[in-house]
Image (cartoon, grey):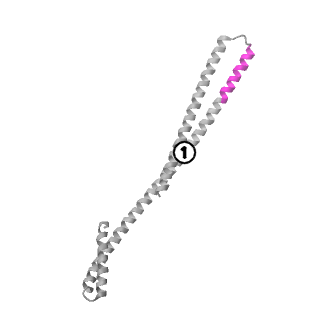
Amino acid sequence: MEEEKMNLKLDMDVQKLKTEKLRKGKNQAEGDLDSLKINYKKLHFSMRTVGLGKISEQWCQEIQEEKIKADRWERKFQEAQMRNETLEKTRLGKFKQMKRRVEELEMALQNCEMQIEFRKAKVADYLQTLAVQADILSVKYELESDRGQELASLLRKVKGLSVRAKPYM
């Protein structure tokens, strides 16, 4: 049970690392998009100021190409953002599922520990009862014969076990 709990914690750590990696990729994509927008504005401004002998059709074609590039980058950014959102939702779902599983395992562990303590107390109580009975029987049979002395010795051993069991009560 402890091993399964440890595996679940490791899985949670792996999911966190994956999410962090996706966030970094998203931030870089956003930075690239911003950079492209700035470059587009600079190019557009320089085209207006310089002119450099291009005819209107050439300018229109170049502008159209840049708009197509900007649109393509915008679509890529949107796709990456959608993938990141999907992965984030999946990671969050797995995290919640693992958290529930850990809680279930912890409850099962507590139940097992309570059962163990209950059984320890029950065994210790039973040994105490046996010790009392052993005292009675040892007194009764100790004087009668060799077999009685053997039985008395055995009963003293049972009493010794009950003394060791007292801390568990």
Position of residue 136 relative to residue 51, above or below, is below
Residue 69 located within the stretch drawn in magenta: yes
Q: Main SS of the magenta segment? A: helix
Q: Nearer the viewer, residue 127 or 141?
A: 141
Give the SS element for disc 1.
Answer: helix
Q: Position of residue 74 (x, y in %)?
A: 63, 30
User: Residue at 56% across / 45% down in the picture?
Assistant: 90
Q: Position of residue 84 (x, y in %)?
A: 58, 39
Tell me: 115 left or right of 53. left
User: Residue at 66% across / 11% down in the picture?
Assistant: 50
Position of residue 142 relative to residue 32, above or below, is below
User: Residue at 59% across / 24% down in the picture?
Assistant: 35
Residue 67 quadrant:
top right
Position of residue 103 relative to residue 138, above or below, is above
Q: Position of residue 101 (x, y in %)?
A: 49, 54
Residue 49 quadrant:
top right
Q: Nearer the viewer, residue 45 or 28?
A: 28
Q: Residues within 10 Å of mark 1 (few under 14, many from 20)?
A: some
Q: Position of residue 159 (x, y in %)?
A: 29, 75
Number of numbered discs overlaid on the protein picture: 1
Tell me: 163 left or right of 42. left
Residue 24 located within the stretch drawn in magenta: no
In the picture, which quadrant includes the C terminus?
bottom left
The magenta stretch is 55-72
Residue reaching furthest front? 146
Q: Which residue is mark 1?
A: 91
Inspect the image, locate mark 1, and give the three-letter code of the amino acid beneath it: Arg
